[in-house]
Image (spheres, rainbow, N blue to C red):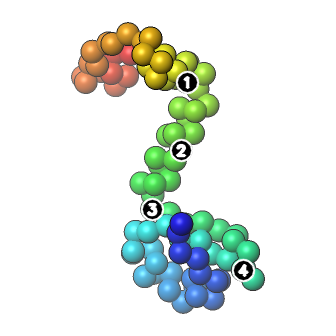
Amino acid sequence: MPDTYNIKEAQAGLPKLCRSGKRFVIANRNTPVMVAMPVEDFEALMETLDVLGDPVAMAALGLALSGKGTYRKLNLDDPDFGL
């Protein structure tokens, strides 16, 4: 669970909080109103949401998890890895 700071604490320590590279929550009157996270975490979250929202990718994942998928060698020179 990320640390939580009230708005005044966050304002006073924002540069230090950002440099820490950790996720944190900003609260207004003990109610969380904002989440801050490193860009890498945000990009990973967006990529995960893209996969979860792609029916073809989810079907392939389901096949792989069930052990019914077929193995294909990845082509690392292809932007789409030859898929």
Instruction: Name the side, left or right, on which 80 lies relative to 61.
Output: left
> On the image, numbered disc 2 is attached to which residue?
46
**Mark 1 surroundings: few (<14), some (14-19) or many (≥20) residues within 10 A:** few
Mark 1 vs 2, N-terminal side: 2
Measure the C-alpha gap from mark 4 to mark 3: 23 Å
Mark 4 vs 2, N-terminal side: 4
Q: Of discs 1 and 3, which sits in the foreground?
A: 1
Q: For the residues labelled 3 and 2, say whether their Cβ atoms are less than 8 Å apart.
A: no
Q: Amino acid at mark 4?
A: Asn
Residue 30: mark in rendering = 4
Q: Is residue 53 above or below residue 5?
A: above
Q: Quadrant of residue 15?
A: bottom left
Q: Quadrant of residue 26?
A: bottom right
Residue 58: mark in rendering = 1
**Mark 2 surroundings: few (<14), some (14-19) or many (≥20) residues within 10 A:** few
Instruction: Name the side, left or right, on which 68 lies relative to 82.
Output: right
Residue 35 rendering spot, x and y as whole percentages: 60, 66
Tell me, yes or no, if residue 60 can be seen here.
Answer: no
Mark 1 vs 4, N-terminal side: 4
Q: Is residue 9 above or below residue 81?
A: below
Mark 3 vs 2, N-terminal side: 3
Q: Of discs 1 and 2, which sits in the foreground?
A: 1
Mark 1 lies on a secondary structure that is helix
Q: Amino acid at mark 2?
A: Met
Q: For the residues labelled 4 and 2, say whether their Cβ atoms are less than 8 Å apart.
A: no
> On the image, numbered disc 3 is attached to which residue?
38
